[in-house]
Image: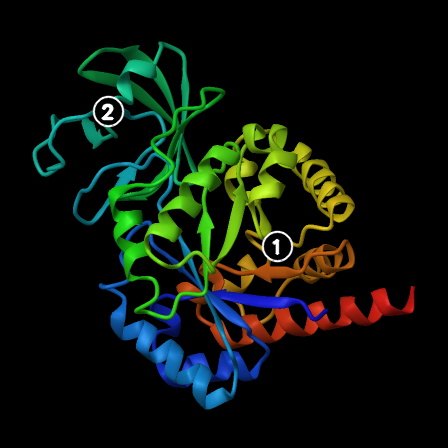
Amino acid sequence: MKTEIFGTLGPSCSDTKTLKKMFENGMTGMRLNLSHTSLRESEEILSHFHEAAAESGVKADLLIDMQGPELRVGHFSGERLLKEGDCVILTEEADDLSDVPAGAQTLPVPDGFLRHLDDGNEILLDDGKLLLTVEEAGAESAVCRIVRGGILTARKSIKIVDKPVYGPALTGQDLMNLRDARKYGVTSVMQPFVRGKDDLQALRRALEECGAQDLRVFAKIENRQGITQLEDILEESDLLVIARGDLGNDMPLWELPAAQKEIEAVCRQKGKPFLVVTQMLTSMIHSAVPTRAEVSDIFNAVADGAAAVMVTNETAVGEYPAEVIRYLANTAAEAEKWKNKQ
């Protein structure tokens, strides 16, 4: 079976011309990340997506990536520069960050987050790009030191290292998007941070209530808890997603390749298709040509049995979205040829 090739919708591929070129280069479907938007707010880009698919003669898959149980930093305007060594105060209060004490910044965190903190805890922001340590945990705020700094924007992920803290399987925004799914041509739904079969059963009940029970259900494995419940999760999903971004935050990075191999082996044994995603062509966000390591990563994923591969920021905000798809699709095709010779 030919490998499914997924891009991700975003500003860099929001016009019909670019999307059509991506389909011509081998793309079979696209992901829409609903962590920061909704189907209704994405109506224009979705119109361009469907138009480009029709003009290219592709029966394209539209995959929505739900908010799910992942915790995120609250709303604030613009971007914040968090400098290594500086202090930052976490609070569950108002989102307005315009007035902050000199020498400190304030970041809004989800309701109930602070009660899980203890002095000495480490906190990852934006898929681990930024790192804080808790110096003084409190009921109304937490004083943290910035260990690994960088730029932070609103609604990025926040995670306490070695402390699984999550929200409900489906948010109110998720339920609204599921009700709109048919109207906007959605064909598949991706559930983030699947902790067990209960999360997927909740999703399937919601889909049935919306009359959309025939949509494919993609289960994202993004932490150790998901790995421990893998066999139950496989029973409730149509396709398993090895989401290496957050999965790599839940273990030392050098353990991630083995975890990927083990998940792939279980999927092959159970006959469950799987998708591999995260940083497959990340250098192409700013480069017209990928690294040798990246094309090898894609090749090996397909050679190991991946039914689908996906890129995210590479097409959503990268400078060469059509070229990204060309390398992704062509490398997957070469891996398919190699497999057929074995």
- Residue at the spot of label 2: 90
Q: Of the two numbered discs 1 and 2 on the same chain, state the one appearing first in sequence.
A: 2
Write the residue at 49% across / 75% down.
60
Residue sitting at 33 percent across and 21 percent down? 145
Determine the secondary structure under disc 2: strand
Q: Residues within 10 Å of mark 1 (few under 14, many from 20)?
A: many
Q: Amino acid at mark 1?
A: Leu
Residue plotted at (24% across, 24% down): 90
Can residue 128 be seen by looking at this rendering?
Answer: no
Is the residue 231 above or below the residue 19 in the image? above
Disc 1 versus disc 2: nearer the observer: 1
| Residue 86 quadrant | top left
Is residue 158 rendered to the left or right of residue 31? left
Which quadrant, please, contains the N terminus?
A: bottom right
Q: Give the residue at the far left of this rendering.
A: 99
Horizontal arrangement in the rendering, residue 197 relative to residue 234 (left or right): left
Q: Which residue is mark 1?
A: 275
Observer able to see residue 308: yes
326 lies left or right of 71: right
Residue 274 vertical placement versus 224 (above, below): below
Residue at the extreme bottom of the image, as rendered: 55
Q: Tell which residue pokes out farthest to the right in this image.
A: 342
Q: Quadrant of residue 296?
A: bottom right
Nearest the eye: 230 or 150: 230
From the viewer's perspective, tell me whether residue 284 is left or right of residue 272: left
The amino acid at mark 2 is Leu
Query: Looking at the picture, how far across and down is residue 111, in whole percent?
Result: 22, 26
The residue lying toward the viewer, choosing from 64 and 204, is: 204
Of helix, strand and loop, which one carries label 1? strand
